[in-house]
Amino acid sequence: MLILKSAAQIKNQIEKARQLKPLVRPVEPRRYLVRNSEGGMNRVQFLFVNGQRLATCQRPDATPCPANQHGLACVHVAASVGHHIVTMMELRARAVAA
């Protein structure tokens, strides 16, 4: 599990994701499928627990992504974070409008 503190923390992985352009599919709010280098789909989930922003990434066989095991950002989290930010902004805007 990765504790997200700032964009600078995952800057290098964001650049790598921009180059690789992995497919990101929203599954539901806070959950995404991201194509990995082997052609499978990693599951990325964003959580907000006790004031901390967390991210997890699991391979198709439900094992944690190697970078995630060490508390580091992986390209899968970096690729999906932009989608996640936009999704959360849209949900907040709908809540305010309602």
Image: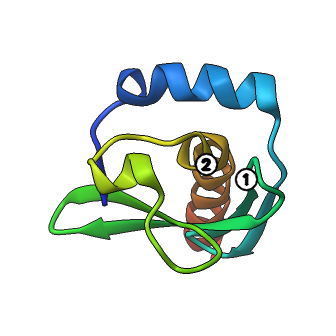
In which quarter of the view is residue 96 placed? bottom right
Indicate whether 9 appears above or below 91.
above
SS under mark 1: loop
Q: Amino acid at mark 1?
A: Asn
**61 sits to left or right of 26:** left
**Residue 58 image position (x, y, % from top left):** 52, 68
Q: Are marks 1 and 2 in contact (CB under 8 Å)?
A: yes
According to the picture, the residue beneath numbered tag 1 turns out to be: 36
In which quarter of the view is residue 59 placed? bottom right
SS under mark 2: helix
Q: Amino acid at mark 2?
A: His
**Residue 81 image position (x, y, % from top left):** 58, 46
According to the picture, the residue beneath numbered tag 2 turns out to be: 76
> Which coloring applies here?
rainbow
- What is the count of numbered marks? 2
Q: Residue at the spot x=15%, y=68% of the render?
A: 50
**Residue 34 image position (x, y, % from top left):** 72, 58
Single out the mark in the foreground, 1 or 2.
1
* Label number found at residue 4: none
Pick the residue in front: 87 or 7.
7
Q: Which mark sits nearer the N-terminus, 1 or 2?
A: 1
Q: Residue at the spot x=74%, y=25% of the render?
A: 18
Indicate whether 5 appears above or below 69.
above
Where is the N terminus found, in terms of image quarters?
Answer: bottom left
Q: Residue at the spot x=55%, y=63% of the render?
A: 92
Where is the C terminus found, in terms of image quarters?
Answer: bottom right
**70 sits to left or right of 33:** left
Indicate whether 4 appears above or below 62.
above
In which quarter of the view is residue 72 placed? top left
